[in-house]
Image (cartoon, coloured by chain):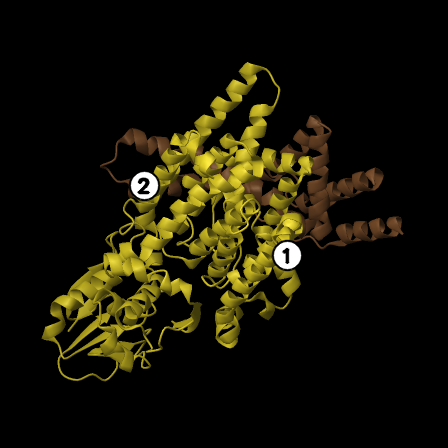
Amino acid sequence: MKTVIANKSYLLVAIVLLAFFLRFWQLGQNPPGLYVDEVSLGYNAYSILKTAHDEYGNFMPLVFRSLNTYNPALSVYTLVPSIAAFQLNEFAVRFPSALAGTLTVLLTYFLTYHLFKKRNIAQVASLLLAISPWHLQFSRFYHEVNIMVFFSILGLVLLFYSFKKHYLVYLSAISFGIAANTFHGAKLWIPLFLFVILIFYNREIFKFGKKLIIALLILAVFSLPTILNFQNSLVRPNSVSIFKEKKPQETFISGYLSHFSPNFLFMQGDFMGRHAVPGMGELYIFELPLILIGLFNLVRQKNRTAKFLLAWFLIAPIPAALAAPTPHAGRALVFLPLWQIIAAFGAYSLWQIKIAKYTKSIALVLLALVAIYNIATYFHLYYKHYSKEKAPDWSDGHKQMVQYIGQVYNGYDSIAITKYYGYPYIYLLFYLKYDPVKYQPQSENKDAFDKFHFYSGVLPRTFGKTLVITTPQPNAQNVIKQIKMNNGDTVFVAQN
Amino acid sequence: MKIIILLLIAITIVFKQAPKSQACDVYAAKRAIPPRIFYEQTIDGNNQPVLITRFLHNKIGIFASEVAKCYFNVIAPNAMYAGAGIFGVIFEIYLAYKLVLWKKWYILIILLLLPFAPFFNIFENQIYYMHKLFALFGLAVFAIKK
């Protein structure tokens, strides 16, 4: 690894700096608000930091109860250092994901270099990941899947380097173990991925001898949280599982294939507003020819690297296809950085084709023009359109609502807030930095705490002077404040 | 035995019930242009230089993206699956791979251009049968080779 760094590392440093800039710039402002899962995980991390208990008062839990489901432990614990360093705010919650995303770009270089032994393929792969709309989207908000991808790629890179330095296998096992405890889909993905790695690299892996047994023990220890909380760990997977469907096998096949849909990959992306920028695919359209050439050459090569990458390519959509809806950019994030590696290999193969020099130059210029237009369009759509178009998907307006309540809190005896948008209680806890010690004893009642009451439909019985926060209604009486999203649309109104 | 298996696969491809194809044609693409331009330019606002707005949100770009969506709808693996079943997907991809490998560019170009036909209201309801046909070609190539 040292030699890789020592040899002409300037380009790699530039790529990592670019990845860092694209992931951290305006991180707290765009996407324009914290989604409810980010808020919930963030407040639980804050609660752990302050009291060593989660919002329900459980001491250092191995599985976190949150918003009617249970989350793997590391989805919360990874946030604790960041919240300790930057306080409880948007930047702190998104920091671990942005950092993991930046480091994944670096790891992609080492992974690709190990696979192909070509520095230029590795550089192109890491550059493509650095600017990837798919990876940027998931690096710029806190989604556990991005942390899982980072740790699984770290585990893979360490495993490859452990073939020469055997002690690294322990670190690899720890990385895979951490990955398995970050995201629900990891319970399926990590064993599947390890199985594929074992198939293609068993010769080297079995050379570890006793070290392999210790590595397996490490993995076993990391699987304990899931085993000890088996029932709770299944709540979320069961709620999205396709096995409730009438024809699950057909749903699986069409869900699996949908992740290879060119419209999903290159034109429209995931239909969920948080997962893609409208008008963009998950990948750039200029990558399409490179991916096709890369895939064709991988199939033709038939060496171990090619077979391993193709096996990864075929298993990547399996966890996503077992859940609904599909295609799902989040659950299929395990595709990364594979698409970029294939595209980089495709670019290398294209460069190697023996055709007239001017033909090659014309092809490259055309590709570069499409790439520039494509990339410019993406950044324009992300920074100019996305925050306006998709503000509701990010629960924009909740922060403004809590800030307003903070200003008028002392003037009212009770405050009633609509549950129309989901879980207002967690936004109050988060943005008021509500003392976890005070909240934990009240945590079982999700309809009220402190002087706050949460209602859906009929207003609850409150006492004294009451402030009502509700959705905008035509001809509403006694409106004292309109609470707007960043795009100017009213999301809440305050009434006396 | 091999012949029986191949025949069974061929039967699953032929008898896979094809759904009705979605309307995605040149008229739909043209209709999509004015509202998209209006919507996108409104978001950009008046403060942005007109040149940038025109460069990023123009008729040609929107029309091209609508054409691409229609085209990709037809060649998507899910469209292959809907028309010819899971074996159909495998053998269509196999056929495409072999055509590239053998450098049969003219046949490949025809195969790649055919999905444009429904865009111009040609063969719009026959597109799933096209997948059956290509899958059977792929199966035949596989049978001959193996």
Question: Dot 1 surroundings within 10 Å: few (below 14), some, or many (20 or more)?
Answer: some
User: Going 63% across and 43% down the picture, which residue do you hit?
Assistant: B124
Q: Position of residue A31 (x, y in %)?
A: 32, 51
Question: Dot 2 surroundings within 10 Å: few (below 14), some, or many (20 or more)?
Answer: some
For this rendering, which residue is in front, A343 or A159? A159
Q: Position of residue A300 (x, y in %)?
A: 68, 35
Q: Position of residue B53 (x, y in %)?
A: 32, 34
Please state the chain letter of the residue tagged with numbered disc 1 in the rendered image: A
The type of residue carrying mark 1 is Ile
The residue that mark 1 highlights is A253
How far apart marks 1 and 2 lie (CA) works out to 39 Å
The mark total stands at: 2
Left or right relative to A299: residue B71 = left
Secondary element under disc 2, as helix, strand or loop, is helix
Letter of the chain in yellow: A
The residue that mark 2 highlights is A21
